[in-house]
Image (cartoon, rainbow, N blue to C red):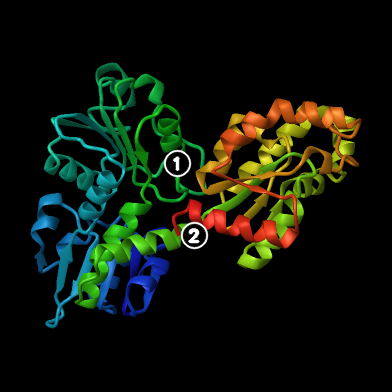
Amino acid sequence: MEYGLIGEKLGHSYSPMIHARLADYRYELVEVAPDALDGFLRARDFRGLNVTIPYKRAVIPYCAELSDVAREVGCVNTLLVRPDGSLYGHNTDIGGFIHMLRGAGIDPRGRKAVVLGSGGTSLTARTALRRLGAKETVVVSRSGPVDYAALYADHADAEILVNTTPVGMYPNNGASPADLKRLPNLLGVADVVYNPEKTALVLDALERGIPAVSGLPMLVAQAREAAELFSGRDIPEPAGEAVLREIRGQTLNLVLIGMPGCGKSSLGEAVARAMGRPFVDCDAEIAARAGMPVPEIFARFGEARFREMETEVLRDACRESGRVIATGGGSILRAENVRAMRQNGRVCFIRRAIEALPRDGRPLSSASTDAVRKLWDERRERYIAAGDFAVDNNSTLSDAAARIQEGFYEAVGH
């Protein structure tokens, strides 16, 4: 191999996608078992590597030389085979971490910081916080001198919170390593997890008005620095920002919300086809799981059971990446549903004239136009609040589908 990423379990890594856009070398993912690490590194069957959990400290003894940054941090995430065959160890994570904080407007200077986790990325975060002038940094781990009970008992005055654990990472979306209600002084939250784009921890912070960021900007920034080392050429920062926008454009879901009959399903199919993406119709998925159409679910089991099934389907659909997802008209009624949509996507509110909304087969709006208007009055503000952008569907399908795509790419900064 030329270049790549090693770790014990790599899952759905974005690294090959990022490096392919930064340079012209081959970049592979290689899962290495702990008992195979020694043989792999000694074989030197590569030109350069990125290193992730759990090997960022384990690779140090194999390095003939460490960069000043790697020595300062105490872990290595980038290896380069030098002309004499020896290994040079460097750390690009710290630059990526600092870039992530600055981009989110999080300034630790003079602040008390808490770092969740004690592994290699925790060392990176602690070093970065020290460089950035944090007044105090407390490390919290399940088995360390400061555990999670001590966090809330003794360090509830924390102002900056950094998560370096894998809690909340795909496919375990929705889990959070900390209860922000018990940390009332927070001024900034950073989570190194990058899939989903907004972890539960980040969503909690944003809902409280706290500046917060997940790890995708860090991932791209550290990859840009590693690509410079691998390729031997400068890669300007704007190139990294362009890659970040492109990765978001490819990996984030496009989620459609709106009134029953506004055209979410037909528009979703058209947009998914145009974008070359998988399409998920949540009402159709609910019907498939239940083995009966939606009106029958309402008739036999009631709306409450339907809403439970809707939440299950949304949770499963929205944890994945790169999909077009058409939701049911009432999906925005539950806060957990909106959080599921936002974790890994951008939400488009489809607007359509009330008199143009079909009523047949719609359990809550089939009675009359007045029933439709009542439903609209009850839900309008929720649709507006949940949407990242809105598109009118009052002309042709192709026109609305094109504007949905434009709105999505604008929303992801593409």
Q: Is residue 116 left or right of residue 287?
A: left
Q: Position of residue 296 (x, y in %)?
A: 90, 37
Tag 2: residue type?
Answer: Gly
Q: Is residue 413 above or below residue 47?
A: above
Disc 2 to disc 1, C-alpha distance: 18 Å
Secondary element at image label 2? helix
**Circle 1 is placed at which residue position?**
199
Which of 387/98 is in front? Answer: 387
Between disc 2 and disc 1, the foreground one is: 2
The quarter of the picture where residue 187 lies is top left
The quarter of the picture where residue 286 lies is top right
- Residue in the image at 73% along x and 32% along y: 307
Tag 1: residue type?
Answer: Thr
- Residue in the image at 61% along x and 42% along y: 315
Residue furthest to the bottom: 83
Q: Is residue 129 left or right of residue 249?
A: left
Crowdedness of circle 2 by 10 Å Cα count: few (<14), some, many (20+)? many
Q: Are marks 2 and 1 in contact (CB under 8 Å)?
A: no
* Residue 354, disc: none
Which of 199/30 is in front? Answer: 199
Q: Going from the N terminus, do you reach mark 2 or mark 1 first?
A: 1
Q: Is residue 23 left or right of residue 197?
A: left
Q: Position of residue 309 (x, y in %)?
A: 73, 37
Q: Is residue 260 left or right of residue 107?
A: right
Crowdedness of circle 1 by 10 Å Cα count: few (<14), some, many (20+)? many
Q: Position of residue 376 (x, y in %)?
A: 74, 31
**Circle 2 is placed at which residue position?**
249
Query: Which quadrant is home to the C terminus?
Result: bottom left
